[in-house]
Amino acid sequence: MPPKSACGPEDLESAITCPCSGFAYGESGQLDVMRSVNDHEIDLLELTPLFDKVLADQGGAIVQRWGLQEKDSEQVESEAFVTRVRARPVVKIMHFADYDHDGNSTEFFLQTGVEPCGKISGIVVGLNRTHPRLHAFGTTLHPDKPLVMQKREWEALLKAAGPIEVLDWPCGDHGSEIESDMKLNVTNGGIQAIRREFECTETGSRGRFLREQIF
């Protein structure tokens, strides 16, 4: 079946809301990634099951097709506006980089969900020396379970020269009484990820340690 509009320009009021962050203006449907040599398929990965359901009428995976511009929120929904949006350049989704620090830029970040409010989350897809077929990257503890993190956390891991700590969720964000961070590291065995939670104090700062979860 052909893809259908999702967070599209024909429904601007919805497209500029938090659930559509990173997806506007997009399309939804079945999504696979394929490797080929001389037009011959050598590897295929089904991506649709890895997506969160962020829209009530979501028809599978969602991928942005045309970019959202700052002044779009000032526009009035019309056929002319939809035509202008669809005349924009198609957004490039696959930006290859070396997320696992093995010396090869054979992976890309793929948005699969949205956290409140407008925090883009997703997975990294690609291949490496120990797993030379297309897959969603997991951790050393759970290599076959896709690791889902916020985009900025993946970007921090990409740039890191060693173990890092990245703020995951601050005190007070959407009324949260718990602050969390991610301890991330890349070893020869893969990605290590630990989420730590801390109690928030009455002043809104980080308090005592509560628990941790190893991914």
Image (cartoon, rainbow, N blue to C red):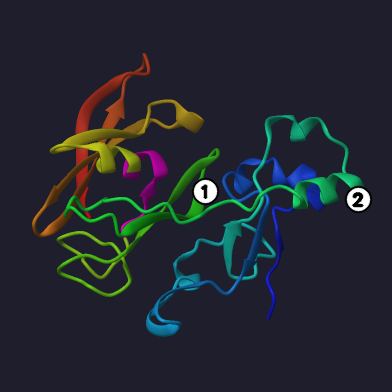
CB atoms at circles 1 and 2 under 8 Å apart?
no
Mark earlier in primary sequence (1, 2): 2
At 28% from the left and 62% from the top, the residue drawn is: 137
Vertical position of residue 173 compared to residue 94: above or below: above
x, y percent for residue 11: 80, 50
Q: Which mark identifies residue 79?
A: 2
Q: Residues within 10 Å of mark 2 (few under 14, many from 20)?
A: few
Which residue appears farthest toward the left when viewing the image? 188
Q: State whether residue 8 appears in this view.
A: yes
What is the quadrant of the C terminus in the image? bottom left
Q: Which residues are magenta?
A: 147-154
Vertical position of residue 82 compared to residue 5: above or below: above
x, y percent for residue 214: 19, 52
At 41% from the left and 44% from the top, the residue drawn is: 151
At 53% from the left and 52% from the top, the residue drawn is: 92
Q: Residues within 10 Å of mark 1 (few under 14, many from 20)?
A: many
At 69% from the left and 65% from the top, the residue drawn is: 57
Magenta span contains residue 136: no
Q: Quadrant of residue 108?
A: bottom left
The reply, left or right, for residue 140 in relation to residue 97 is left
Q: Which mark identifies residue 114?
A: 1
